[in-house]
Amino acid sequence: VSIMGKTAFCPMSQIDSRRVVDPTVYIGQKLEFQITQFDRKGRNIVVSRRKLLDEQKEAHMAAFTEDHKVGDTVKGTVTRMEPFGAFVEIAPGLEGLVHISQIAWGRLGHPSEALRIGQSVEAKILKIEPGVNGRLNISLSTKESTPAPWENLPANLKEGSVVEGRVTRLMKFGAFVEVAPGIEGLVPLGEMSLTKRVTRAEEIVKQDEKVKVRIKEIRADEQKMLLSIKDADEDAEYISNTVKAAPSGARGATAAGSGLGGGMGTLGDQFKGLFGGDAGGSQSQNKKK
């Protein structure tokens, strides 16, 4: 560091209050430093910028705790990201952590899916507590500063509609599909295939796969939604509903005609036995032959 024609040295750990990886980014910048070591002849000068920043941070922490409390909404800037969350500077030198589960209403694999460094955000204060070395641990939530998705469902999410979603979780009893940010529905095993008995969700879908689903039922007060993959196609839903409405004997004929466990066959094969007349007559003639 050049100070009044003299060359001073600033250790890597004293350049900033944060961890410095590449000190070359500071070349050419005019910054304030505190002299920590100096001999009379000026041959050995050591400086620190971190000491000044830490003092400023303490002042900002005191002011922040006086003016803010848990539940308040603050503005800040995303400064860095880790797999577990994002750090947001809410006052000069004062950061809070937004855990990955508090970034968005939907599920994220990494904070970078929803945020970027340098982005301005609003966040709700979830927790303020003392940390080590006199620091403050501040927990934030960017998703809590926006309305909960279940409180105002998008217009396209209604019973009977077909939408595209992303598979978020595979369970023993089915798969959860996100049909809108923060809104998931369950596709039970019995609603996955029209032609085969499904015992594991992995037989039909994969994690993060995009699928079309039909919304069968919505319980907004319980934040639950029943979905169907097998009824996402209009023809498939018509066939499924016809089978359910048919007498028990006719259902057996339909199962045989549609080739469950094998090929689907033609639409005529799938509906064979559901109606009287020619279908029944042709079966009798076949038996006689």
Image (cartoon, grey):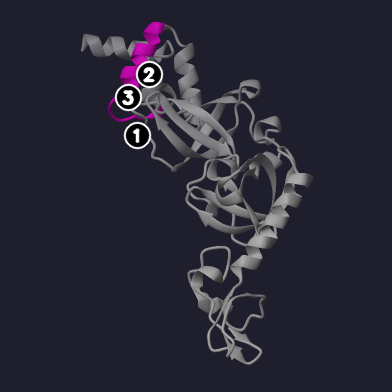
Separation of residues labelled 2 and 1 (CA atoms): 32 Å
Q: Nearer the viewer, mark 2 or mark 3?
A: 3
Q: What crowding class fits label 2: few (fewer than 14 Cα within 10 Å), some (14-19), or many (20 or more)?
A: many
Q: Which residues are magenta?
A: 248-267
Which quadrant of the figure has residue 60? Answer: bottom right
Identify the residue at horizontal 65%, vertical 60% (top origin): 93
The main secondary structure of the magenta stretch is helix
Q: What crowding class fits label 1: few (fewer than 14 Cα within 10 Å), some (14-19), or many (20 or more)?
A: some
Q: Can residue 45 be seen here?
A: yes
Kind of residue at disc 1: Glu
For this view, does 250 lie left or right of residue 287? right
The location of residue 102, given as percent across then percent down, is 59, 41
The location of residue 118, given as percent across then percent down, is 63, 62
Determine whether the residue tagged by mark 3 lies in a helix, strand or loop: loop
The residue tagged 1 is 202
- Compare residues 70 and 175 and report the one nearer the observer: 70
Find residue 272 and name its label. Answer: 2
- Compare residues 115 and 167 and report the one nearer the observer: 115
